[in-house]
Image: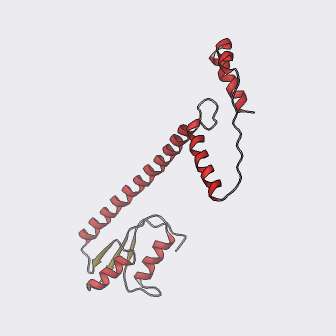
Amino acid sequence: YESFDPELVLLDISMPEMNGFEVSLHVRETFPDWIPIIFLSSHEEPEMIAKAIDAGGDDYLIKPVDKLVLNSKLIAMQRIAHMRRELKQATAQLEQVNQLLTQQANEDGLTKLFNRRYIDQKLDSMVAWHGRHHMPMAMILLDVDFFKPFNDNYGHIEGDRCLQAIANQ
């Protein structure tokens, strides 16, 4: 049943080939996204109910099941599934925004090179790593000589172009 894409699973404990506990565990292993699993069984024992929930069940109804109760449970599971989808979507959007914010916090907007804050943090961690592992380390730091007079003479737009040209080398 790996080819199915279920939105809900209704199980009995007693079934041919596999029991409901095994099916529930297999569903949880096979499908990474949450799928509501409701057990419908004539077993009333608290141990059976606990075992069903431990096997991945989300609810347990004792047969015979009232249609109104079953319908209410299905509506509740749909509502939970909908909220989980919305939460997953919001989490993905938040991760994208966080990646963008991290990028913006770590790079210069004009040159797209790492900024001083990022380099200072990275340098601290690299010096510590090389020190712990007794490894040599080399670093090159570039400075643009006479940039201020260039900027004053040719203007900020040309100064920006100059920095971008240097960054692209």
Q: Is residue 67 above or below residue 95?
A: below
What x and y, as percent, mark residue 6? 46, 67
> Who is closer to the viewer here, 68 or 113?
113
What x and y, as percent, mark residue 115? 59, 36
Q: Is residue 80 above or below residue 115?
A: below
Name which residue lies at 39% across and 57% down.
84
What x and y, as percent, mark residue 23? 45, 79
Q: Which residue ends up furthest to the right in the rendered image?
A: 169
> Who is closer to the viewer here, 152 or 24?
152
Q: Is residue 15 above or below residue 74?
A: below
> Who is closer to the viewer here, 94 or 164?
164
User: Where does the C terminus fall, quadrant-wise?
Assistant: top right
Q: Quadrant of residue 66?
A: bottom left
Q: How many marks do you count on the picture?
A: 0
Name which residue lies at 30% across and 76% down.
60
What x and y, as percent, mark residue 144? 70, 26
Q: Which residue ends up furthest to the top in the rendered image?
A: 153
Name which residue lies at 36% across and 81% down.
12
Rendering colour mode: secondary structure
In this picture, residue 149 sits left or right of residue 90: right
Name which residue lies at 65% across and 59% down.
133
Q: Quadrant of residue 103?
A: top right
> Who is closer to the viewer here, 158 or 128?
128
